[in-house]
Amino acid sequence: PLRVSLWVYGDGSGNKLSVRIHDAGDERYVRSFGNVDWTGWREVILEEPAKWSRWGGNNDGVFDLPVRATAIE
């Protein structure tokens, strides 16, 4: 994938927002967006998941499709 796009409802709490994706080889890619410092809905777009921090799984550095799981933290 070239990017991840999601809509997040912000409560102005300042909590940290991160997105994690598990690829088909169970490698985990994670990217921090920053703090939730807004209120209401906002689109969050994170570019180039293959270049995010990664660990685990087959650890080959290649984003293997299909996406196995996603998480918002």
Image (cartoon, rainbow, N blue to C red):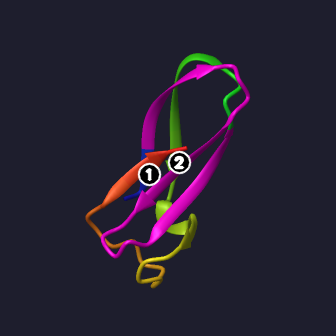
Give me the disc on residue 49: none
Give me the residue at 44% from left, 36% from top: 6
10 Å crowding of disc 2: few (<14), some (14-19), many (20+): some
Viewport quadrant of the C terminus = top right
Do the residues bearing badges 1 and 2 touch, measured as CB atoms within 8 Å? Answer: yes
The residue segment tinted magenta is: 5-34
Nearer-N-terminus badge (1/2): 1
- Callout 2: SS: strand
**Which residue is the site of mark 1?**
3
Give me the residue at 59% from left, 55% from top: 31
In this orientation, which residue lies closer to the viewer: 64 or 17?
17
- Callout 1: SS: strand
Where in the figure is residue 53, as x and y percent of width and height? 60, 67
Give me the residue at 44% from left, 48% from top: 71
**Which residue is the site of mark 2?**
46
Give me the residue at 70% from left, 23% from top: 13
How far is disc 1 from disc 2 in space, using C-alphas?
6 Å
Where in the figure is residue 1, as x and y percent of width and height? 37, 59
**Corner quadrant of residue 68:** bottom left
Q: Is residue 24 above or below residue 15?
A: below
Q: Is residue 29 magenta?
A: yes
Where in the figure is residue 28, as x and y percent of width and height? 47, 67
In this orientation, which residue lies closer to the viewer: 20 or 42?
20
Could you tell whether 54 is left or right of 16 in the image?
left
Q: Is residue 41 above or below residue 8?
A: above
Q: Magenta-highlighted stretch: main secondary structure?
A: strand
**Corner quadrant of residue 34:** top right
